[in-house]
Image (cartoon, grey):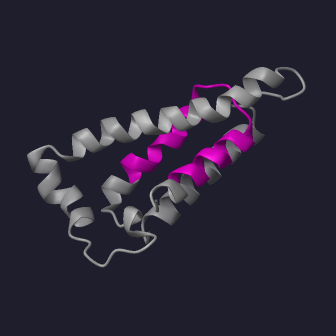
Amino acid sequence: MVFGAPILSLFECFLRWMYANDYIGTLSFAVQPVWFILLFPILALWQSFHFYVVHLFLHQPFIYRHVHAVHHRNVNTGPWSGMSMHPVESFGYLSAILVVLILPSHPVHMIFLGYWLMLGAAS
């Protein structure tokens, strides 16, 4: 979590700045309430797909040995063991939040996905 929280914080600050300066398409509940609500489960599915692809990549022999093995060496399991990662792995895992750069959304969707990423790794 030493690397995960700062990396996610940097992503969040960057994305909040992008929203504030209208560089990201923003979705409003008042204009599209159905899409606004449907985006929550869609983002959860996106996170699962993104995790699968990133995790598949992390298990390639060279990457596993130098990056992902840090995660598997964690023998003192606890609620945050899922976030015990090499910084490169944390960056790859948490980069799922960058989907809001291309998917019209609201900042609350970005915050939801950030929480989903951090807390989902704990389960």
Q: What is the quadrant of the N terminus in the image?
A: bottom left
Residue that lies at the very extreme toward the bottom in this rendered image: 76
- Asked whether, in this view, residue 95 is left or right of residue 61, the answer is right
Q: Quadrant of residue 86?
A: bottom left
Q: Residue at x 56, y 50 (%)?
A: 116
Q: Is residue 59 above or below residue 21?
A: below
Q: Magenta segment, which residues?
A: 91-117
Count the marks: 0
Q: Residue at x 30, y 79 (%)?
A: 76
Asked whether the viewer can see residue 26, the reply is no
Q: Residue at x 51, y 64 (%)?
A: 6
Residue 107 location, x and y as percent? 73, 41
Residue 106 highlighted magenta (yes or no): yes
Residue 78 location, x and y as percent? 40, 75
Residue 100 location, x and y as percent? 60, 33
Helix, strand or loop for the magenta stretch, by majority:
helix
Residue that lies at the very extreme toward the front in this rendered image: 123
Q: Is residue 25 above or below residue 116?
A: above
Residue 116 highlighted magenta (yes or no): yes
Q: Residue at x 38, y 56 (%)?
A: 90
Residue 14 location, x and y as percent? 61, 48
